Amino acid sequence: MQTRSKNVIVIVDGWSSGRYLAPAFIGHGYECIHISSTEKTSRFGYKPVDYIANFHFESTGMSGILENLRGYSVKAIMPGSESGVVLADLLADNFAVPRNDARTTQARRNKFHMIEALKKAGISSMRQFASRSLCELLAWYSESELDTVILKPTMGAKSDGVALCSNAKDIEAAFVTTHGKPNVTGVINTEFVIQERLQGQELMVNSVSCEGHHFVTDMWIGVGGLVDTISTDEYAQLVMRRTEIFERVEKYVLETLDALGIRNGAAHSEVMLTVNGPRLIECGARLTGAQLFAAVEEAQGYSQLSVMVETVLNSGQFQRRVNALRGSRQKGLRFVYMCSNREGYVVNNPDLIRFGELATLDRMIVFPKIGDYLTKTHGSRGRPGYAFLLSSDNQTLDMDYVRFRELEAKMFQHVLEA
């Protein structure tokens, strides 16, 4: 059977959490076209069958992509993951669709330029410096009088290539290890940004924007006791609306979205609430990664994904819709980052049966399977799985969380035992 749609949704790099976009639009009766910006990155979750056409930028080029798309009536163009942000902006600039200004794309993709955009707008931000030269990075560090800093590729993503540095030797080692190598988005690391290490409470803020109006769909606060790592969180707790911390961080994030030129689409902001107020760590102009949106729907009746899809399909109802959502009831939701303190080849598939005894367990996903190499967890990139614990009773959440960690340790021991 062949079909032809009047309006199609174009998704650039529809992997990672972007894999949920096409099925969501298909569920509303729309068809989707996929564009790959690069062949050099992981395509986790990508399913070609979800799309009526698939185009490859590296082989087709911009002119070829545009020629193909002009054969359709394009309703929306959006990135599915971090690697697709730049190309999605460039493509959208050629169509009469809701979009963000392609002239300011670097402020939404480059980790240095996004903080500079905040400074230009008069928004509180961290100290930083960027360069392709190790000597210049070391010179700035020496003059900064900072003790601990963060070094990361300006065009990276997740915690890939991000290093916590306490001295010049740490900076040099991190630079040498990562420079010239491709990161998780497929970009070769050539430029690095060195930033002060922010201290405080880390929050993750997900939002959807429509023609310059913003709505924070969900906010999470990181909780953990790990030290001297990039990602110290053991889990993230859903922050309730109408609390002081939610409203304070929300106000700051809405200002940063304006400063970064995010007028339309999804965004995922990471913020540190310091003693001097909120400070942006970084922001991605796309859906949040590594989240099971169904669990968030169970907790509050909507998610960043559902609001994003509804906004694309009916932008005129955005303000009325979000005003109604602000009054929705929320349950307690804990996003647990799985952690392995063991490593080795997996010889047994994970046994999840015992986890069924946890009354609060709503969703769980474990990545390692037989034949995979399980590494010790360090930072967000190496997490071997996720789980969501859902309950209106915080005491029950606490009890089940402790039991979850006990079962998790036994599970990872079992998968490595011959």
Image: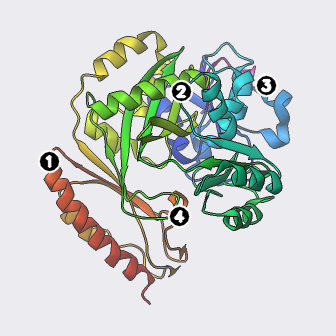
| Dot placed on the residue nearer the N-terminal end, 2 or 3 | 3
| Dot placed on the residue nearer the N-terminal end, 1 or 2 | 2
Residue 21: % across, % down:
51, 36
Q: What coloring was used for the rendering?
A: rainbow
Residue depicted at 30% across the width and 39% down the height: 239
* Segment colored magenta: 70-78
Type of residue at label 3?
Leu
The disc label shown at residue 256, or none? 2
Q: Mark 4 points at which residue?
A: 382
Q: Is residue 204 magenta?
A: no
Give the foreground label among 3 and 1: 1
How much space separates mark 2 and mark 3, taking CA atoms? 31 Å
Q: Mark 1 points at which residue?
A: 393
| Dot placed on the residue nearer the N-terminal end, 3 or 1 | 3
Type of residue at label 4?
Gly
Q: In the displayed structure, does residue 133 sit left or right of residue 214?
A: right
Type of residue at label 1?
Asp
Residue 246: % across, % down:
33, 32
Asked which secondary structure carries label 2, the reply is helix
Q: In which quarter of the image is residue 356?
A: bottom left
Query: Mark 1, residues whose alpha carbon is within 10 Å: few (<14), some, or many (≥20)?
Result: few
